[in-house]
Image (cartoon, rainbow, N blue to C red):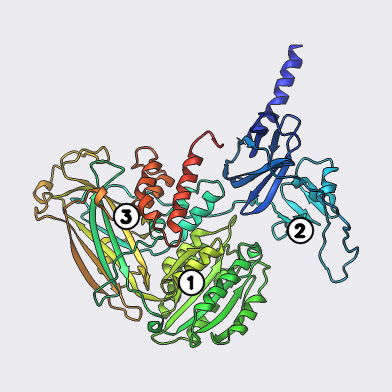
Amino acid sequence: MKKITLFLAIAILPMTHYSYCQTALEGKVTQADTGEPVIFGTVAVFQDSVLVTGTDTDIDGNYFIYNLSPGVYDIEASYVGLTTTRITDIIVKANKTNRLDIVMSVSNNLLEQVVVTQYCAKLIDSDNTTSGAIVTSESIKSLPIKGINNIVGTAAGYATESQITIRGSRSDPTIYCVDGVRVRNPSYEDQETYATFKENTFANPVDEALSTLSIDVDRAAYSNVRRFLEQGQMPPVDAVRIEEMVNYFDYKYSEPESDHPFDTYAQLVDCPWNIGHQLLHVSLQAKRLKTDELPNSNLVFLIDVSGSMSSANKLPLVISSFKLLLDQLRPTDRVAIVTYAGSAGVALESTPASEKDKIIHALNLLQSGGSTAGAEGILTAYQIAKENFIKGGNNRVILATDGDFNVGVSDNDSLEKLIEKERKSGVFFSILGYGMGNYKDDKMQILAQKGNGNHAYIDNMKEAYKVLVTEFSGTVFTVAKDVKIQIEFNPAYVQAYRLIGYESRLMDKEDFNNDMKDAGEMGAGHAVTAIYEIIPVGANSHYVGQVDELQYQNPKKSSQGIQNGELAILKTRYKLPDEDQSTKRDIKISAKTTPIDSVNDEVKFGLGVALFGQILRQSDYLQGKPYDLIMTLCNDASTRDGDGDKSEFMKLVKLAKAMDVETMVVR
């Protein structure tokens, strides 16, 4: 008997482990007035207004939905005689059984008799080359199935394993409808890649008086992080680039008043997350250009049409995005289209934007398929841009891809050398990233940073509109290139400092005065924010380490600094787009600190975004995870949010906080 018991225990263990490793949602549906279970009620799961799956409650009112992808869903319960109940923004965590109990109230609506006079589907459609089957809600009730995912097996040629397949083909381009409601499987294989970097540490100004960096106007990391959070997943640490999250937002900085392409501002404020510390807030604001001030454009749309771009959020979204951009161009601008899959090809020679119908027709003909020879496409696009080069104009290649290069030059080092060579032509480079599952962020960062360009991640039409319409001039028109920042800290006031973010943009101190060293570009109207955390002299902090006194030199003679009321000197360098010699400017920063309560709401919002990025990156320089502090810092600015970006950010903070809590609590 003992042997039998032991065997049963061992046999049950694998099943128990499996049940706890799958992602599922369970709960109980009851009536509000009586507390009685709702028997055979319908529970449906929606994501982005699309029906994902569903099930019925059992005789005790319980439901169980398995094989869900982690994400944020809307759950809807319905039953005849009861008011349909919809609960939004439910976070389903990975590898656990999430619970959501639903309470339904009695409906006051009277039921009416409905007579169906005819229901008929055509037996044969000679013009239809697709395969499909009609499954009505009435027939579903009589089928021996538990959920909508099982329905597809009732049609010839359909098979279900981990994904739905049709006669052996891939599942992601296929659309399923049940009673006219679109149904899909949102799961995908994760093959995304990100460059790894280490968080900046505190530096002693006696040892390292200078902090040197290239500016970064990219915003790709923020929209990519948003995508993860909205799917119910915390983003990978290396996907979080704090500077790109901070620079995503419009802080309404003052318009430049000088003759330079941008002006620089700095302010020292109290640090709200490490009491006793300070924050140096540095901002650069570029001039905005009116439409009649913009130079003529010579654009090459470089579009990835390989097989990996077949998903709805890739090539179809790319085509729609470029149509938005086309609407912003003037008749005197020019557009060419280069595509690449297994090889590169010219879909449209350089054409005046006045021939809009011709350009749109070329876009509409694009289809995906084949491998990805990205490097060949880049070379072809640069060649066309150089052949149609406009002196004094805006010459730019705009690449749209998921970054999955797999034919020809595809490793990161070779791509870097290729793009560094081509940037000398005077042609700028912009990258629009699309898709998920195989998104190659590391490659796009290299191309954007080394190609005199910028990088945005577009996950929906709203983001496409922001990048290509609202911020059109900043995305497409460069007003200053090779923009560098160098700050000299005064040890009389600064015990230690660290730059928050910009890990991939740091430069050697000698690079600041070297015009041969490449740096970031600023587009028209672009703003750049950099934030330093400072430990002032006299503050006790465990972040500052101690070393033994040196035996062969006396650093005390040069470590005192100058008591002149100046915290630091901020220097900038830049080149005009068509020049090779840089211009240097500098400003002195006061050591006077502004209390956080007196700081401008827009500045506080930027600090809140920086704090959020540090939490997502699991920073070593935070005590706990102060989500509530983020809400406090950002609340006032988010209530006066014209474009909705800041209020959307507040929602993301709430989602992240909920996912950081072990127990899911919903009512």
| Picture coordinates of residue 30, whole percent (x, y) | 67, 33
Residue in the picture at 49% in, 87% down: 388
Label 2 SS: loop
Q: Residue 489 versus residue 254: which sits nearer the camera?
A: 254
The answer to whether 488 appears left or right of 521 in the picture is: left
* Disc number placed over residue 601 in the picture, else none: 3
Q: Single out the mark in the foreground, 3 or 1.
A: 3
Q: Which residue is mark 2?
A: 169
Q: Where does the C terminus fall, quadrant-wise?
A: top right
Q: Single out the mark in the foreground, 1 or 2.
A: 1
In the depicted structure, whether residue 605 falls above or below residue 471: above
Label 3 with label 1: CB-CB less than 8 Å = no
Looking at marks 3 and 2 on the same chain, the residue that comes earlier in the sequence is marked by 2
The answer to which quarter of the image holds residue 258 is bottom left
Residue in the picture at 73% in, 40% down: 81
The furthest residue to the right = 123
Label 3 SS: helix
Residue in the picture at 62% in, 83% down: 357
Q: Which residue is mark 1?
A: 469
| Picture coordinates of residue 140, whole percent (x, y) | 82, 46
Residue in the picture at 44% in, 50% down: 650
